[in-house]
Image (tube, rainbow, N blue to C red):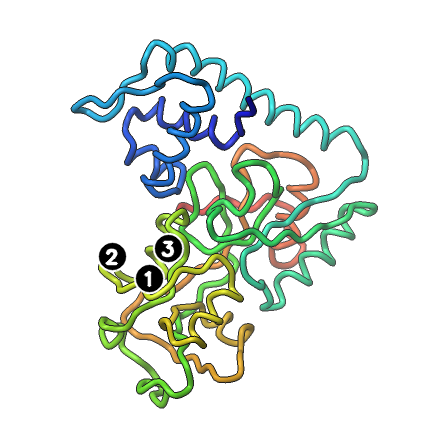
Amino acid sequence: MDVHLRELRYFVAAAEELHVTRAAERLFVSQPALSKQLRALERQVGCTLFERVPSGLALTRQGEALLPVARDLLARWDEGLDLIRQAAPTGTLVVGLQTAVGRGIQAEALRSFRERMPGWVVSLRVVGWDDASVGLADGSSDVAFLWLPAPEGIATFVLSTERRFVCMPEGHPLAGREEIAFAELADEPLVALPVAAGPLREFWLGRPDAIVGAEASSADEVFEAVLAGLGVVLLAEGNAELYKRPGLVSRPVSGLPPARLAIAWRAADRRPAVTAFLQSLLPGDHEDRPRADRT
């Protein structure tokens, strides 16, 4: 029987919140995704861990017995990762991302990081949108470029604030406009992020009652869906330039708050390599660690 760390993290969150909605918001996942993982864990251990009560959830005796064990395992795993990474004077810093960064940000950060941490290697890791933490939650990424809002427990520093655009086939009735009001897209199907993306999916749909024409887990899937006529998609101004495709056009959208690109890290992570990478994203020669933005 192999239980995954993600299942244990979901269990601990649900056990501490005793409410599926609050636990899902804390984990930055959808309620169905959380419930599915909890049921999978119960099948793995062969017993019921939660009972449904009017106020939400209650731990069974088996759940109460598992909780301290799960907390200890997660804490020991996190400590073990830190010890492994601190054991060597050189190593690999894993940078997670879900879309191209561009904007002159990534290249400059990598140059500055190599100067600060000679001998260290940077590994860029593309993560699907079904992981809203971009690999930070399970430790597979050390830092990550992501679009806000971010999951709880993740610190962020905003790097770019941009207007939102809509991308559509060049033959679309609105394609000839210089700017489009968001209200004009009310009846348009949109290409959505996976349900597991939680609030990030809602942000890029623009409204809770948006019509979903297709779902996509990567940038390539998004633009293939738009080209196929399954829906239009909202994207950041910089990405409208980075992801130009034949047959597609992008136009600015009014009536929406801007998108914010950020660098993110685990709030308690103080390893020198992580701090050096964060410092490389500050303007000039400032040596202070970036302050976490409230998200």
Q: Is residue 96 left or right of residue 64?
A: right
Please report the residue visible at 57 percent of the width from the left and 54 percent of the height from the top. 97
Residue furthest bottom as drawn: 176
Dividing the picture into quarters, in which one does residue 266 lie? top right
Depth check: give the residue in front, 61 or 164: 61
Q: Amino acid at mark 3?
A: Arg
**Residue 205, disc:** 1
Q: Is residue 178 left or right of residue 262?
A: left
Dividing the picture into quarters, in which one does residue 91 lie? top right
Q: Residues within 10 Å of mark 3 (few under 14, many from 20)?
A: many
Above/below status of 254 relative to 273:
below
Q: Helix, strand, or loop for circle 2?
A: loop
Q: Are marks 3 and 2 in contact (CB under 8 Å)?
A: no
**Residue 201, disc:** 3
Q: Are marks 1 and 2 in contact (CB under 8 Å)?
A: yes
Q: Is residue 99 left or right of residue 51?
A: right
Residue 71: horizontal and vertical position, in percent?
Answer: 49, 19
Q: Are marks 1 and 3 in contact (CB under 8 Å)?
A: yes
Q: Helix, strand, or loop for circle 3?
A: helix
Please report the residue visible at 77 percent of the width from the left and 48 percent of the height from the top. 121
State the CA–CA distance, disc 3 to disc 2: 10 Å
> Which residue position holds label 2?
208
Above/below status of 179 relative to 40:
below
State the CA–CA distance, disc 1 to disc 3: 6 Å
Total labels drawn: 3
Q: Amino acid at mark 1?
A: Leu
Q: Residues within 10 Å of mark 2 (few under 14, many from 20)?
A: few
Q: Residues within 10 Å of mark 1 (few under 14, many from 20)?
A: many
Please report the residue visible at 33 percent of the width from the left and 62 percent of the height from the top. 205
